[in-house]
Amino acid sequence: MIQTAVFGFGNIGGGVVDVIEGNQSEIVKRIPEGMAVKYVLDIRDFPDSPYRDRVVHDIDIILNDPEIRVVCETMGGKEPAFTFTKRALERGISVCSSNKELVEAHGAELLEIARKNHCSYLFEASVGGGIPLLRTLIESLSQERVTSILGILNGTTNFILSKMEAVGADYAQTLKEAQELGYAERNPTADVEGHDTGRKIAILSSLMTGKTVHYDDITVEGISAITSSDFDWAHRKGYTIKLLGRSARADSGLQVLTAPYLVPKTHPLAMVNDVFNGVFLHGNMVDDVMLYGRGAGKLPTGSAVVADMLEAAAHQGETVPVRWSNEVLTPLPKSQNADRYCVRVPSANRADAERALEGMVEEVWSNEDDHEFVCATKRIEAGELEARLNQLGDSVSRIRILA
Amino acid sequence: MIQTAVFGFGNIGGGVVDVIEGNQSEIVKRIPEGMAVKYVLDIRDFPDSPYRDRVVHDIDIILNDPEIRVVCETMGGKEPAFTFTKRALERGISVCSSNKELVEAHGAELLEIARKNHCSYLFEASVGGGIPLLRTLIESLSQERVTSILGILNGTTNFILSKMEAVGADYAQTLKEAQELGYAERNPTADVEGHDTGRKIAILSSLMTGKTVHYDDITVEGISAITSSDFDWAHRKGYTIKLLGRSARADSGLQVLTAPYLVPKTHPLAMVNDVFNGVFLHGNMVDDVMLYGRGAGKLPTGSAVVADMLEAAAHQGETVPVRWSNEVLTPLPKSQNADRYCVRVPSANRADAERALEGMVEEVWSNEDDHEFVCATKRIEAGELEARLNQLGDSVSRIRILA
């Protein structure tokens, strides 16, 4: 029996225990000796939990138990998760994490510690919840030059956008509803302002390039400025609106950003609705590949953590390879990110807008009856667009177009 | 350098060579010593190919070369592929195959030979072309009880159905166009009658259950009877039509079939268009997962073969585990497959149809103005449906509804 421990008995940690206990009959097909949760590490007690006898408060009990070869870290946050992870890896205990904040900040360093200690650091569940995304990128596509990754990586914002689209409601009202349903936190900033998606696309960018792409270096925009009239225009032209994490290799460098995009209704990502996530990869040989599934939730995320624990257990004494070095790759600055845009101004400002965008208008979307002037631009760098639109002040709105 | 050989230098074999040669810079990140194609085995010569010097006609040259540790089998058909694969495995040489016919017929046996000889038999490319599907099922979801698989697994039929839908054309005309474009063979039977999808869902069923599900035991229906009026009704009720391979665990047994289905427009598989493939899995913990990509094509399929070759090379001297035993699992007979159906008869036969379907009509779709009577049934076993519809003769048409 492979003995394990769960660091952090919250929602995901509870899911890990449920999957290991509930699916033992499947687990033994991969790991014939089976897998058990010997300890649960938390500062709290859980007197009503069937696992209360396994709860410990002192990590040393776990680290000093020679039976423990694999643990999962489902604590979230940087500390004490970072210290606990390092200490486990230094003892040759593999760590499987769902903690995107820690992975984003210290992934390369923790992978190096794992290598030195002949154990594994794996983190499938840190991006895309239950979707088997990282293993696909690292292993199944290791023969590919992956040139771009486009993802709907946050269930909360996708729920809000799907709802705004379906019922024509405005942002504030939909956010409130999402909070009531438990799909959005009381303080929704990390989700709605794109921080969560940003951390995930930073991790994906690091895995795509094999270098370290820092969250702090990427452009992050959220969805709080999206209005129902953005959706009206999107529908009129055959688009929906999605918050995308995007990482693309270009001749000039790596373009990494998180921002809302108009996505053509015919694009496979357009049908990723509600709390689901979807990730679209492009490889130079395999062309387009998409993965879709539940990006959050106790059991789907717990399942992804357990997948890593089985992988680590199947490779005891060695390191499951993950190519991510600590060499920093700084993406293009925000101003140099090039995209097509939909630009809207009140009709009264039409002449000013046309002057500002001279030579860059690809298609005019509005007609004489509209009270707005709306157009799609050619591909333009964000810095140049903002310089051109500057003179129009607050009257102008713009949203990127995926094309 | 890991030296390899390609058995069969057709479209996919050529793709394998192109991927290994073209993406060596990616391959060395996984296999630091690199990978090279030392031999190409074919009965033909290729005087104009840059690889002409590597062509051999005698398999023993390859099998007797101790440098060769991994080969790919991209010959197709059962013989001589079966004999060649066995001979290689018996020498401890791993074999990576794109040959669905051989995998379906002899997968369990070849896996057993690989295990005995401490090498691997892998076949990612035999189902879903470039989509990293089998590894996901075998490895990333090994902690899951996968309860159903639903797939669009054949690009030719999906192209035809997508085209019929887009332009309202009829089947015969669209098939002709597909043939002119090279998307359908001159003899299209294996694709349009569902045999190709059937073999693939048989392989997926075997991997899902760990037992052997034979193609000959499953229900196979094709798309040649689909008409433009099927699409008219589909659209009117919010569906599209897809040829699905379907495998689902039920209390009474395993339901495996290949047949055209009405698929709700809101289902993620509805947006898998043209030559793309998509596979929808349900696991008891992870819920729904979908994978999407190019189900055919030289480079995508070649890429999947190379992924397996890298996996085999990374595990030299051991067997990459694939759970598929030779214990035969016979699925439910065709008559016991239960589905919802859309049933259509001319208005003149309405009374007969209502009598025949008494108690099984869930919703009437047609109204007084239609010249047909159209309804959706409750879930009903195929045997019972056919017994009930028998008296209506040729006037009745039926198509399954995915729900």
Image (spheres, coloured by chain):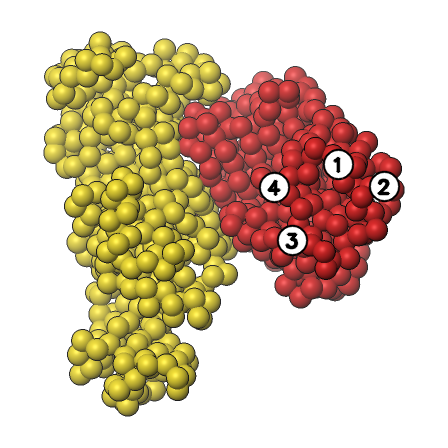
Chain colours: A red, B yellow
Q: Which residue is mark 4?
A: A402
Residue B111 location in percent, x, y? 25, 36
Q: Secondary structure at mark 4?
A: loop
The answer to which of A194 and B252 lies nearer the viewer is A194
Q: Amino acid at mark 2?
A: Leu
In this rendering, which labeled residue sits more in front, label 1 or label 4? 1
Badge 2 vs badge 1, beta-carbon distance below 8 Å: no
Q: Amino acid at mark 4?
A: Leu
Residue A315 location in percent, x, y? 46, 29
Residue B271 location in percent, x, y? 46, 53
Badge 2 vs badge 3, beta-carbon distance below 8 Å: no
Lower position in the chain sequence, tag 4 or tag 2: 2
Assess disc 1: are there few (<14), some (14-19) or many (≥20) residues with their C-alpha within 10 Å of its C-alpha: some
Quadrant, the C terminus of chain B = bottom left
Q: Which residue is mark 3?
A: A234
Q: Secondary structure at mark 2?
A: helix
Assess disc 3: are there few (<14), some (14-19) or many (≥20) residues with their C-alpha within 10 Å of its C-alpha: many
The answer, for residue A186, to whether it is visible in the render is yes
Q: Residue under mark 4: which chain is it in? A: A
Q: Amino acid at mark 3?
A: Ala
Could you tell me which residue is drawn at 51 percent across and 28 percent down? A146
Res. A357 mark:
1
The answer, for residue B138, to whether it is visible in the render is no
Label 1 to label 3, Cα distance in Å? 21 Å
Reply above or below: B97 against B348: above
Q: Which residue is mark 2?
A: A392
Same chain for mark 4 and mark 3? The answer is yes
Lower position in the chain sequence, tag 1 or tag 3: 3
Label 2 to label 1, Cα distance in Å? 11 Å
Same chain for mark 2 and mark 1? The answer is yes
Q: Is residue B21 left or right of residue A65?
A: left
